[in-house]
Image: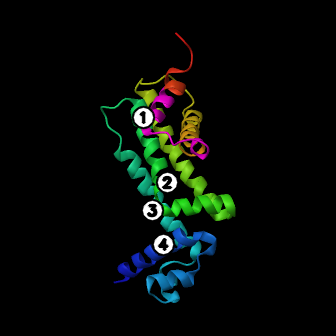
Amino acid sequence: MSTDRRQAILDAATKSFSLFGYKATTMNQVAKLANVGKGTIYTFFKNKEELFDEIISKLIADMEIAANNVIRPTNTFQENVHLSLYEMLEFRIEHQLTIKLFQEERDIGTPIVQEVMQKMENTILNIIEQKITRAIEKGEIRQCDSELTAFVLVKLYIALIFDWEKNHEPLDKETIANLFDLYLIKGLAVD
């Protein structure tokens, strides 16, 4: 029974954060949405920050699972990195909570939201850095600074998926993969 209540609180809080953002969500709203007394929330979570942190930790774990689920041992390093990056960034833009958090970070700059968005980006960077390190060890790619390379790859993807679309038609997955290959794998030099 307490597990059901705890989950109802988490679901209600996720809904509230998704609709109103972190700053505008209150424990009263969460209690009302969960159909529990406000005091019941405090039996499971000491404050709004702890509740928010648990929701974000689950979201990040789900994002990591989604990124790893697209990896195929028969794919090249480039294919797997492309699929992982695309999956993680799509995951972020398809979930209402992250969309609302992007807006709050941009429009209000709530410190805890900025921290969460940085945590999500760091997770993506770490996953890609690990893939780069493994590819170097396996001899699939040349020796490089895996942290810096992960940063460049992630920033390029963000630019192609989010920034490009501000003034242009969205790029499809295949076009992004081709641009990724052209700029980072083959380079622009003519042989």
**Residue 164, quarter of the rendered image:** top right
Report the quarter where the N terminus lies.
bottom left
Where is residue 12? Give x, y as percent. 46, 76
Numbered disc in front, either 2 or 3:
2
Looking at the picture, tell me which residue is in the foreground, 74 or 43. 74
Q: Amino acid at mark 3?
A: Lys
Secondary structure found at label 4: helix
Q: Amino acid at mark 1?
A: Glu
For label 2, the crowd category at 10 Å Cα-Cα, with few meaning under 14, some 14 to 19 and many 20 or more, is: some
Of label 4 and label 1, which has the lower sequence position? 4
Looking at the picture, tell me which residue is in the foreground, 21 or 131. 21
Residue marked by disc 3: 58
Residue marked by disc 1: 174
Numbered disc in front, either 4 or 1:
1
Q: CA distance from mark 3 to mark 4?
A: 14 Å
Q: Amino acid at mark 2?
A: Arg
Q: Is residue 53 above or below residue 179?
A: below
State the predominant SS element of the stretch in magenta: helix
Do the residues bearing badges 2 and 3 touch, measured as CB atoms within 8 Å? no
Q: Is residue 167 magenta?
A: yes
Of label 3 and label 1, which has the lower sequence position? 3
Residue marked by disc 2: 92
Of label 2 and label 3, which has the lower sequence position? 3
The residue furthest left is 74
Do the residues bearing badges 3 and 4 touch, measured as CB atoms within 8 Å? no
Residues in magenta, as a range: 164-181
Residue marked by disc 4: 15
